[in-house]
Image (cartoon, rainbow, N blue to C red):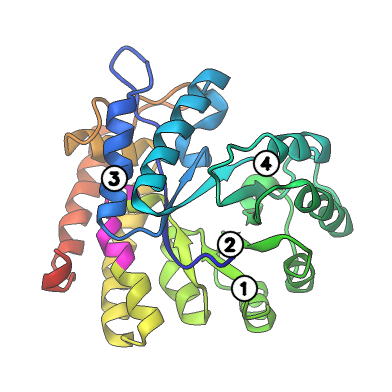
Amino acid sequence: MTFTGLYVPLVTPFTATGEVALEALSGLAHQSLDAGAAGLVVLGTTGEPATLTAAEQRQVVDVCASACQERGAQLILGAGTNTTAGSVDAVAALDSRAAAALVVVPYYTRPSEAGVIEHFRRVAAASPVPVVIYHIPYRTGRTLGAETLCRLAELPNVAGFKYAGGGIDDTAIGFLSQVSPGTSVLAGDDIYTAPLLALGASGGILACANVAPAAYVELIAAWRSGEIEHGRRLGNSLVPLASALFAEPNPTVVKGVLAAQGRIPSAAVRLPLLPAAESSVSAALAALEGVSAQLVPAAR
C-alpha cells in the first residue's frame, strides 16, 4: 500500500467545559477531506492522545473512521509506545477500519539503531495493517542514519515514514536519494515540507493543514506534477504560517486559530499544555491571509 498526498493529523477539539467536542471533530474531518486530503491521522501528537481516556480515544477514532469510510479516504492511526511489547499490543488492537498504523521510533529509552530495527521488525510483523514509521528525533532522542532508515524501509509490512528529521541535512538527502521508490515518505516537519517534496517525498502529515488544508493539498500536487515555480511560491508563502503555528507547543496555536475561525468551540488544551497567547494566534491568522493569495483560483 502506498500513501500519497496530504494526511491531516487532526486536533482533538474540546468544549469550554473540557469534554471532547465530537461534532466539531466530525466537521474538521469532513472539511479536510472536502479540501482534497487523501486521509486523516488520528491519535497523533497533534490530537493530544496521551491526555485522552481510553473511552475518549475510541470515540475520536470512531468519528474519524466513519468520515473516512464515507468519503473513501485512508485512516492512519497512531499506535506507538516506547516499548516493543506495548507497541505490539497497540497495533494488534487497532480499529479494523485503519489503513495503516503510525508507530513512533521508541522514545526516551534511546535504543541503539540495531535495536530500533529489531523493534520495528517485531511491531510490523504483529500489525494487521502496514506500518508508517514516525521518525522525529527531537521528540524521541534517537537519531537514525540514512542507512538505518533504508534498512527499516526494507522490513516486511513497513509502508513508509513520517519524516520529521528537523532539517534538510545529509541524512535527509541520503535517505531520500537511496530509499526504494515503493516506500512512501511523508513530510512531517511543516516548515520543511516543500524541500522534502522537492527531494521526492510523496506527501505529508502536517499539523498546519488543520487550518489550511487546501493550500497543502495544492502544494503537494504542484511538486508532484512538476509545477515547480508555483510549488516554490506557495511553499514560501506557507513558511510564515508554519513558523507562526509552531511559535508555541503544538497544537496550542492551531487550536487558537481554529477557535477564532469558529471551527471548534474553544481553544482549550489539556495540561501540561496551556492555551496559546492571543498575540501568537493573531500572528498565525495574519500569516494565513498571505497564503490564500497564492492559491490558484480553482482551489479557493
Which badge, 1 or 4, is on the more N-terminal residue? 4
| Nearer-the-camera pick, 207 or 246 | 207
Residue underneath mark 2: 163
Which quarter of the image is occupied by the N terminus?
Answer: bottom right
Compared to residue 58, the image places residue 252 above or below, namely below
| Amino acid under disc 3 | His
Q: Which disc is residue 30 wearing?
A: 3
Marks 2/1 in contact by CB < 8 Å: the verdict is yes
In space, the residues marked 2 and 4 are separated at their CA atoms by 15 Å
In space, the residues marked 2 and 1 are separated at their CA atoms by 9 Å
Which badge, 3 or 1, is on the more N-terminal residue? 3
Marks 1/4 in contact by CB < 8 Å: the verdict is no
What element does badge 4 sit on?
loop
What element does badge 1 sit on?
helix
Marks 2/4 in contact by CB < 8 Å: the verdict is no
In space, the residues marked 4 and 3 are separated at their CA atoms by 26 Å
Which badge, 2 or 1, is on the more N-terminal residue? 2
Q: Is residue 43 magenta?
A: no
Compared to residue 256, the image places residue 139 above or below, namely below
Residues drawn in magenta: 210-217
Residue underneath mark 1: 172
